[in-house]
Amino acid sequence: MASALVENHFRSNKLPHIWCPGCGHGIIMRSIVEAIDELGYNKDDVCVVSGIGCSSRAPGYMDYNTLHTLHGRALAYATGVKMANPKLKVIVITGDGDCAAIGGNHLIHAARRNIDITTVVFNNNIYGMTGGQYSPTTPTGEKGTTAPFGNIDKNFDLCNLAKAAGATYVARATAYHANMITKLVKAGMENKGFSFVEAVSVCPTYYGRKNKKGDAVQMMRYLKDSSVNVKAAKKLPKEKLEGKFFIGEFHKVEEPEYTEQYQKIIDSFQKER
Amino acid sequence: MENKNIKLMQGNEACVEGALTAGMRFFAGYPITPSTEIAEISSLRLPKVGGKFLQMEDEIAGIAATIGASLTGLKSMTATSGPGFSLKQENIGYASIAEIPCVIVNVQRGGPSTGLPTSPAQGDIMQAKWGTHGDHPVIALSPSSVRETFDLTIKAFNYAEKYRMPVMLLTDEVIGHMREKIEIPTADEIEIIDRVKPESGLDKYNPYEVNEGELVPKMASYGEGYRFHVTGLVHDETGFPSNDSNVAGNLLDRLMKKIDNNIEDISLYEEYRIDDAETIIIAYGSTARSAKSAVDMAREEGLKVGLFRPMTIWPFLDKQITDVAKKADNIIVAEMNLGQYVNEVERVGNKYANISKCCKANGELITPDEILAKIKEV
Amino acid sequence: MTTTNQKGLIINKNWCKGCGICVEFCPTNVLEMKDGKANIKDIDSCIMCKQCELRCPDYAIYLGGKKDGK
């Protein structure tokens, strides 16, 4: 018993999912599926690749070609899949630890190649699957089970990282802004190149509890109240932006796509014959 | 008049030629001495046959992309050496449990760590078997010549496709960089095996279901209409994760039986002058070349010496090595490490023969003279 | 455990994990928490905006019936 969208795009016999009550991941997963539905892709042509962690359990529920790989390696596997069969619409679902710590190298290089993969990071600022250790996106000063006295690491801005590495589409939304995630993922899928969408999630179980952020509702409210669309931000005075983070489209350029460039090499030999 | 295809070729080049003959259409790797030529030649050859080459950002990405490509139906390979082989271990386990065919070439060099990058070694024999965590099936082959590198690369692909698993080709710096004249066999002389795929249009496809009389589950490719799930977690026949101890036990049992039930098909070896031999040398890879010379030298001196040369390193040739041990009074295992394969030989042969070793791990080949001296010593 | 009504708002209580997000962000106060699960308290106020469905992490609340889909 579920909505038509859920029935059509999920392996509904695998639901309900394993995520905790109030976890933002389910919202983001649904928004991605909505994007695929709106784009009208044939499900047989969609391939979702993930690594390891809470977010990376998503593909198991999604009724496409799905690949649950090793911690950090989703983009490396996805690069092989996309290169070998460029007709596939490849989406990588990953988490902040998966993509920015153990998989950081693959992230920057997939972005640099501008290979046609859309990466959606479920950023919950913590390692959830292992019980709440601080991650590369845990804000400085906040706590995790391995940062009992406060995190002294500086946290990554994932969108800046992806942009600097060469991604041709970079955007951010939050679990509160479910429709915006759909819109951004759609735009990312339509971009011929490497697209990076940071979906800010909520982890009430570990990150929220450890840092006294309240329950899922309060954490969702924070996402609503603390985010400012990057377009609107330009018109706002500085004091109105204090303590806020930006959402929306940050970067969009056209550049040669990797598999197309390689195909040109192959084609050059076919002409020779 | 027969038109023979004769070429002067390097071992690493023969590996790529063999791979292309076997049907390789995807290679992803990372430069590392002494395997780099395999990547270089693949980058040159693959686009000409419509295949794909990727130089990845690291060794781990190299094998990960290789596994990903195999899931779309392309025969895929990666190549590495020493430190790179260490880095690939976790992914070898993934390909084992998820049953993704692929070939991993390890042109062995001196270790541990960065060790001796330009020198030969055979120090990764046990790593090939136990390098990735957990119990898993392993096939590893080791060629002793350029032509055999060509042949065993084809075999490696065939086993990978037939048994749906990663297969390792363990060469070494000498075999990889040596140039020899080889005759390339004609197409009708070569057996090529492709993975078994499910029929199209089935109502239901269970990606890990094995029916009566089938060796492995039928393997669909991504994008063909079967929207299946692949994971490195223990999974049931539907491909979805399970924590059930019965499911876990049955899966591991089935994976191991792919090898155990087909060991004869995977057992490749050569016997040289062993019929009346009192002392039998066991050696593989480049060391077997020295051992063969040592046998001839010993025979000239009237000593009854022979050579048993495993080309299949894993699974271990229990039956053949037992027979060799029963036949001989003395066995000498010669290998470029401080004693790895010899431990397995001792396990099966100890009660039948005196087993000793002729080992060296300083980056130099073991010479025929050194082996001959050992023959005279035992 | 299904609630159906003229607006087609459906709650699958088997899937509801009781996080309360739908209750909080319903703009017309249609929903409440009851026995740890989301519950419809005032269906007449429902404007069928789908805010609950979009933000339900567990796909437990949705606008079904003839209005479902696009």
Image (cartoon, rainbow, N blue to C red):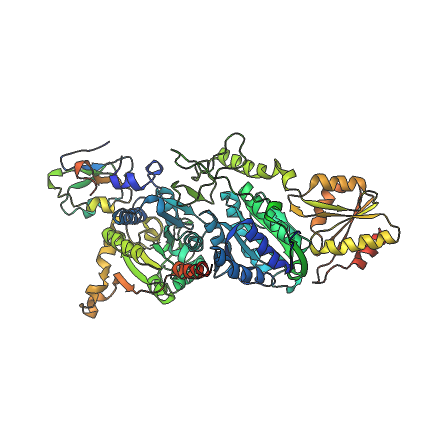
Q: How many marks?
A: 0
Q: Position of residue A224 (x, y in %)?
A: 22, 55
Residue reaching furthest to the right: B302
Q: Position of residue A227 (x, y in %)?
A: 24, 59
Residue reaching furthest to the left: C44
- The answer to whether residue B62 is above or below residue B234 is below
Q: Position of residue A164 (x, y in %)?
A: 36, 67
- The answer to whether residue A250 is above or below residue B130 is below
In front: A35, or A82? A82
Looking at the rendering, which quadrant does residue A159 occupy? bottom left
Instruction: Residue at 77%, 54% (x, y): give it.
Output: B291
Residue A134 appears in the figure:
no
Residue reaching furthest to the bottom: A238
**Is B225 situated left or right of B12 in this image?**
left
Residue B44 appears in the figure:
yes
Residue reaching furthest to the front: B1
**Is A239 situated left or right of B198 in this image?**
left
**Is B26 situated left or right of A261 in this image?**
right
Instruction: Residue at 18%, 41% (x, y): give it.
Output: C31
In front: B67, or A259? A259
Instruction: Residue at 63%, 42% (x, y): give it.
Output: B266
Q: Position of residue B82 (x, y in %)?
A: 60, 59
